[in-house]
Image: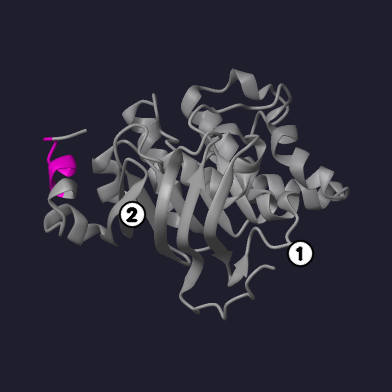
Amino acid sequence: MSAPASAPDAGTKVSIEAFSYFYPGGHAALRDITLAIARNSILGIVGPSSSGKSTLLRCLNRMSDFVHGTRHTGRILLDGEDIHGPAVEPPHLRRRVGMVFDTPVPLPRSIYDNIAYGPRLHGVRERSRLDELVESSLKAAILWDEVKDRLETSALRLSGGQQQRLCIARTIALDPEVILLDEPCSGLDPISTLKIEEALSELKERYTIVLVTNNTKQAARVSDEVAYFLMGELVEHGAAQQIFTVPRDRRTDDYISGRFG
């Protein structure tokens, strides 16, 4: 029998309580994670490879369910409700908690249809409403001015940085509450990276954002809070300024100073 939902903290959007995640065979990818993610903020998650960062993202919207034979202990609460509870349908959860991956995967369709695809699946048919969603989503991803005169051209003709912002806009079009980003600037040039960072800074006014990044300077620039993961454990969590100036744990200091990882 699942535990009852907790009364949500007004300032907390996602609450992770003693959460562990195990792969088949018993290997723990995450161990006893307890972490509160503030609403309308950017949480940057940093750490070396295989530290559990991306695994945590997939657990937050239950994409981890697709790995057969895994199990978890503890809870993840979204607005006080256990996301693994019997009343929670994973497709509905994934609409509330959207995901953007490290490699952009635009649909082989027009720019317009890439953004309109999700809303159409959810019953939006009016052209005027779709036009509005396409424009507002592309503006939120700081892409509108670059593509507004070629919305009917293939999204595959966009540059890598533009394709990544298109994928962010496609997520926004479904009106999520939380946006998860798994190294969204991996392999992008500095200008494209800057535009995505600008978009994230504006998006946090409407959404709660969780950003996995291997770039500690990026985490310092855009994050309100930072969590440092190591070998499946949460080593330290705090305000970005504190983490990057006076970390409490020596392991955190070693990582951000480049002595480890």
Circle 1/circle 2 CB separation < 8 Å:
no
* Residue 75 visible somewhere in the drawing: yes
Q: CA distance from mark 1 to mark 2?
A: 32 Å
Most extreme residue toward the top is: 157
Classify 53 as above or below 238: above
Q: Residue at x 74, y 62 (%)?
A: 86
- Residue 87: numbered disc: 1
Which residue is the site of mark 2?
Answer: 223
Q: Is residue 135 left or right of residue 168?
A: right
Whichever of labels 1 and 2 marks the residue nearer the N terminus, that label is 1
State which region is magenta. 253-259
Number of numbered discs on residues: 2
Asked if 47 appears above or below 236 in the picture, the reply is above
Quadrant in which the C terminus is drawn: top left
Q: How far from the left and from the top, in percent, is residue 52?
A: 41, 41
* Magenta-drawn stretch contains 254: yes
Query: Where's residue 150, x and y in %?
Result: 66, 28
Q: Residue at x 48, y 67 (%)?
A: 39
The secondary structure type at the circle numbered 2 is: loop
Q: Amino acid at mark 1?
A: Ala
- Label 1 crowd bin: few (<14), some (14–19), many (20+), radius 10 Å: few
Query: Callout 2: 10 Å neighbours few (<14), some, many (20+)?
Result: many
Q: State the image coordinates of residue 244 (x, y, percent, origin top left).
A: 17, 53
Q: Quadrant of the N terminus?
A: bottom right
Tell me, for residue 118, which label it has, or none: none
- Residue drawn at the location 48% of the way across and 41% of the way down: 55
Q: Quadrant of residue 212?
A: top left
Looking at the rendered structure, the secondary structure element under dot 1 is loop
Quadrant of the rendered structure where residue 144 is? top right
The front one of 223 and 120 is 223
Residue kind at label 2, given as amino acid type: Ser
Vertically, is 88 above or below 138? below
